[in-house]
Image (tube, coloured by chain):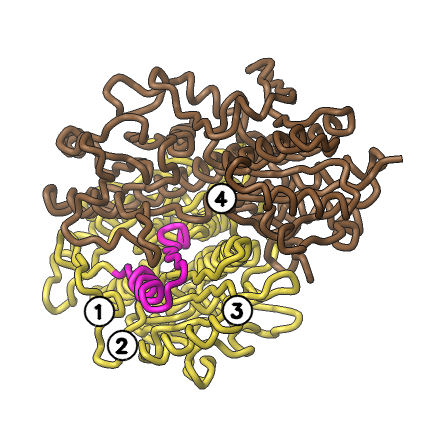
Chain colours: A yellow, B brown
Amino acid sequence: MRGNVIVGQSGGPTSVINSSLVGVYKTAKDRGAGKVYGMLHGIKGLLDGQYVDLSEHIKTDLDIDLLKRTPSSFLGSCRYKLPEICDNRDVYDQIFAKLKELNIEAFFYIGGNDSMDTIKKLSDYAILINSDIKFMGVPKTIDNDLATTDHTPGYGSAAKYIAAVTKEIIRDGLVYDYPTITIIEIMGRNAGWLTAAAALSKTEDCEGVDMIFLPEVPFDIDFFMNKVKELSKVKSSIVIAISEGIKVADGRYVFELADHVEFTDAFGHKQLSGSAKFLANKIGAELGVKTRAIELSTLQRCAAHMTSRVDITEAFQVGGAAVKAAFEGETGKVIVLDRVSDDPYICVTSSQDVHKIANIEKKVPLEWITKDNTYVSDELIHYIKPLIQAELSPVMVDGLPRHLRLNL
Amino acid sequence: MRGNVIVGQSGGPTSVINSSLVGVYKTAKDRGAGKVYGMLHGIKGLLDGQYVDLSEHIKTDLDIDLLKRTPSSFLGSCRYKLPEICDNRDVYDQIFAKLKELNIEAFFYIGGNDSMDTIKKLSDYAILINSDIKFMGVPKTIDNDLATTDHTPGYGSAAKYIAAVTKEIIRDGLVYDYPTITIIEIMGRNAGWLTAAAALSKTEDCEGVDMIFLPEVPFDIDFFMNKVKELSKVKSSIVIAISEGIKVADGRYVFELADHVEFTDAFGHKQLSGSAKFLANKIGAELGVKTRAIELSTLQRCAAHMTSRVDITEAFQVGGAAVKAAFEGETGKVIVLDRVSDDPYICVTSSQDVHKIANIEKKVPLEWITKDNTYVSDELIHYIKPLIQAELSPVMVDGLPRHLRLNL
């Protein structure tokens, strides 16, 4: 007879992170798990004794379908990095005591790089203390920056949202009979995967964005301004996609070039936004044309009303595959997606040693950026396109998408 | 036998402005019009001889359905105000010469306040020169600020988008285990209709926004900060909706209170944005909590992937009703929406003298704002709710919403 399992969510949310939660929950139940616990606010909540029995919150098939369509982490999230084992064994002993108390057989953690680090440390500690609890990582991040996986669940839906609204913004910019230049600022501190998705806006019915700037290569502001000037001689409506993380050669973020800018938050952290506004203002001042700066902002990671069915399905699959692997005895692993074929698109799951994944940031390969650094290659577009396909329509109630809320 | 008709679009675009265009086109064709011309970039394009025969661009029933789902003005827009007749008759003579040359029987203009002013002046001039061309206004504006109509086509879809993404943003803000305060900045320079739609985010599955600030009443910054401080004692995740147009008692916009702010564009026009950022920074500095400022930006008027079917249908109806009225001999009129019943929601069209509508800005009635100016009344919520109902699913091609593009 199977024991209980526990699952947590960590890091920044995505539109499909709950589909992975459903994948863990349903597969664990179907494969005979006792209770399926959910940690509230990840490992930090577990340490504080905060967890729920998921069966009390996911009661019907409708709940499951609503949860797949609910953005943001159903169980809450945290940004908590476990200490090195050699520095503080107490916290590990606390966690394992909790897990023993709950009769946990397998522990699943849905998250990005930091969360995979948690799985690495917990599975290492299990070896150290000879515990047979299984620890499995379930990847998610809109940033698509995890190593060894073809892509990460969450990325496809964010890419679809970015491409769809970019099409709408381009159409909006075309209406006037005077020149307009629009700069769209897209998430991605170090990796340009999300910004690259703006390239998908080029379709039979849309001219697409004119330039794309990724954080993988230095941003040359004079070159940029010259390009804009050239373009504005031949085009009335110009739309440019930039990553929030673009930096000039000396390492400063572009928004740091502004004369007056409050770029630290209450904690003194740099706030990564404002580069679009800075560039729009500069273009407006130098070219005397109407400019707009649009930050796609938080909606990139929570616009569950515009998700990719491929992404939602894969998010579910990685959750389910993690349970299957754990129940078959694997531990210290992360479920990854392996692309078998581009056309037709076929992707399967496999498990990888977490040590190969944690703390490695996968960036856009430089050969997928055009030589003058102003656009992305066809290879990159072909890579993204299958990930945005098909839809899972929202369940609309009284005119609005319905979500499943955790009621405590 | 009927003559030809001409239709133009003017002012800021909406998600459903092309549904009105389809309403004019289809009804004119069905009622025996000869050619249906489309002015490019409104009256300004007509003056420059820029127009198309719409039959060459709307060829199939699929085109019609795609056009209903295409955001932004298919024919292009302009911001052009006709001179007073007494100041410059030349421009009127030019326009009427063009219309005669094209054998125009009726002229339709889809737009907001400025566009209704155009209809007023042209129909006045027709009387003056004894022309029997009919001039009809077809209202559109996301701002919902036109007089005598229950609401304007375009508003319902913008309200639905705002409510839907506000729900998603609220859900996103709830995931962390530390306090966050989010300020959402919503369009509306003088009228708070759009910002009020954030109230619809309060549903069975969502706690809704905590406060709403409209431009109809002065914004008291000390009162605001105290309210936020009070709220933060009892709530971890706070979401506040503000209008971009909120002003303090002395008449300055809130974003003008910032020490350093570039609030004029290349033309010296005040750029109406930054109030959310200013307030988020202030809260962050004074309360030491994590804050976020989110500008919903251009997507409020072009997010055709999230439209209200009620709105799309009504947009079509006002276009059709304008043609019917013109063909029955009316001129100098605007088609308005009259709400017959709230529950069940029933709305019909009628025509109103354009002199009663043009250049009047309808604001949110003060009795629909709560006494402390921090929320809206149930009456206002009941007023908006029917307008966001039901959907017209996008036609998805290769993972993205398909639009109809005007190919010249």
Mark 4, residue position: B301
Judging from the image, what secondary structure is the residue with disc 4 in?
helix
Q: Earlier in the sequence, mark 2 or mark 3?
A: 3
Q: Nearer the viewer, residue A309 or A124?
A: A309
Mark 2 vs mark 1: same chain? yes
For disc 1, the neighbor class at 10 Å (few under 14, some 14 to 19, many from 20) is some
Judging from the image, what secondary structure is the residue with disc 1 in?
helix
Residue B288 highlighted magenta (yes or no): no
Discs 2/4, front: 4
Q: Residue at x 46, y 38 (%)?
A: B164
Give the number of the disc on residue A235.
Answer: 3
In which chain is the residue bearing label 4? B
Which residues fall within the magenta stretch? A272-301
Residue type, mark 1 in image = Leu
**Could you give the CA–CA distance between mark 2 and mark 4, rounded to whole angstroms?**
34 Å
Mark 1, residue position: A257
Label 2 close to label 1 by CB (< 8 Å):
yes
Discs 2/1, front: 1
Label 4 close to label 3 by CB (< 8 Å):
no
Mark 3 vs mark 1: same chain? yes
Residue type, mark 2 in image = Val
